[in-house]
């Protein structure tokens, strides 16, 4: 449990999960058609990975993941910019009839969990970056950055990233060359750069996205 200024939730209106309340936490929350999303809306106009909700210092923001049918807040398409959510906002994915109502409750203690969490969990424990790491990217970090930068805003699967970074296979590499280690080091180096305008986000057990 964590103490927070206010508890944020999504209320589902419509569809088979009508009335379900989903607690939002400080980890990314994925919305889409795939069954391993935190919020599943299984309709043809909804993309497999449709939108992402992030907890930021300024509040919770909603981001469309380059979808064809778009993400809407209060009937207005949000485009590719992050949209700050306010109490009572109505969220719709594509042409879905399901509405997600964003709510801010009174301050208090909330559980750090989300409804519909995949069995494998949505957080990945990543090894801390080496204290001796410098700002220069090594070959694997550079390859990961390129793979994500060319798909900025799009969630890329772990398998796809591994195939691009290590086309000859990563089975025989030492433990310092796992995808999680490379991602952790790249994230640390991005955070070290005061002029950096992007962030690397882990999306559940599925993959990563550059925002």
Image (cartoon, rainbow, N blue to C red):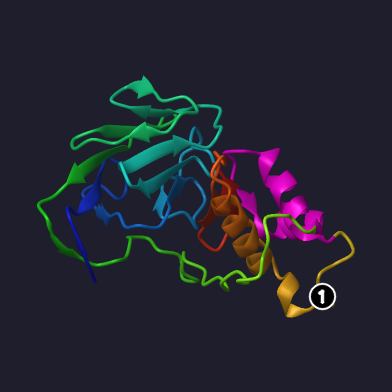
Please tell me in which quadrant of the rendered image residue 107 appears: bottom left
Q: Is 199 displayed left or right of 144 in the figure?
A: left
Q: Residue at x 21, y 49 (%)?
A: 19
**Is 162 contained in the magenta span?**
yes
Find the residue positioned furthest to the left.
106
Secondary structure at badge 1 equals: loop
- Most frequent secondary structure within the magenta stretch: helix
Tell me: residue 171, above or below residue 137. Answer: below
Of 191 and 179, the residue lying toward us = 191
Tell me: residue 206, above or below residue 88. Answer: below
Of 37 and 55, the residue lying toward us = 55
Category of crowding for the residue at label 1, using alpha-carbon neighbours closer than 10 angstroms: few (below 14), some (14–19), many (at least 20):
few
Q: Is 90 displayed left or right of 176 in the figure?
A: left
Residue 138: image location, x then y, percent: 78, 59
Find the residue positioned furthest to the right.
168
Residue 80: image location, x then y, percent: 50, 28
Q: Which residue is mark 1?
A: 173
Residue 134: image location, x then y, percent: 68, 61
Q: Is 50 displayed left or right of 151 in the figure?
A: left
In this orientation, does residue 97 appear?
Answer: no
Of 20 and 117, the residue lying toward us = 117
Of 2 and 24, the residue lying toward us = 2
In this orientation, does residue 5 appear?
Answer: yes
Q: Which residues are magenta?
A: 139-166
Tell me: residue 94, above or below residue 7. Answer: above
Q: Residue at x 23, y 50 (%)?
A: 8
**Is 66 contained in the magenta span?**
no
The N terminus - image quarter: bottom left
Residue 133: image location, x then y, percent: 66, 66
């Amino acid at each position: 449990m964590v103490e927070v200024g206010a508890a944020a939730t999504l209320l589902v209106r419509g569809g088979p999960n009508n009335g379900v309340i989903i607690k939002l936490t400080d980890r990314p929350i994925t919305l889409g058609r795939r069954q391993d999303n935190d919020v599943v809306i299984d309709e043809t106009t909804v993309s497999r990975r449709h939108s992402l909700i992030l907890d930021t210092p300024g509040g919770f923001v909603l981001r469309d993941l380059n979808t064809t049918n778009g993400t809407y807040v209060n009937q207005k398409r949000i485009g590719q910019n992050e949209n700050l959510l306010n109490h009572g906002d109505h969220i719709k994915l594509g042409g879905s009839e399901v509405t997600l109502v964003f709510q801010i409750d009174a301050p208090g203690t909330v559980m750090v969990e989300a409804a519909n969490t995949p069995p494998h969990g949505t957080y990945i424990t990543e090894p801390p970056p080496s204290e001796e790491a410098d700002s220069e990217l090594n070959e694997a970090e550079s390859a990961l950055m390129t793979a994500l930068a060319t798909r900025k805003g799009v969630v890329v699967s772990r398998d796809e990233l591994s195939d691009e970074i290590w086309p000859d296979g990563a089975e025989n590499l030492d433990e310092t060359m796992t995808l999680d280690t490379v991602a952790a080091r790249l994230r640390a180096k991005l955070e070290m750069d005061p002029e950096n305008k992007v962030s690397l986000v882990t999306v559940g057990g599925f993959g990563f996205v550059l925002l």
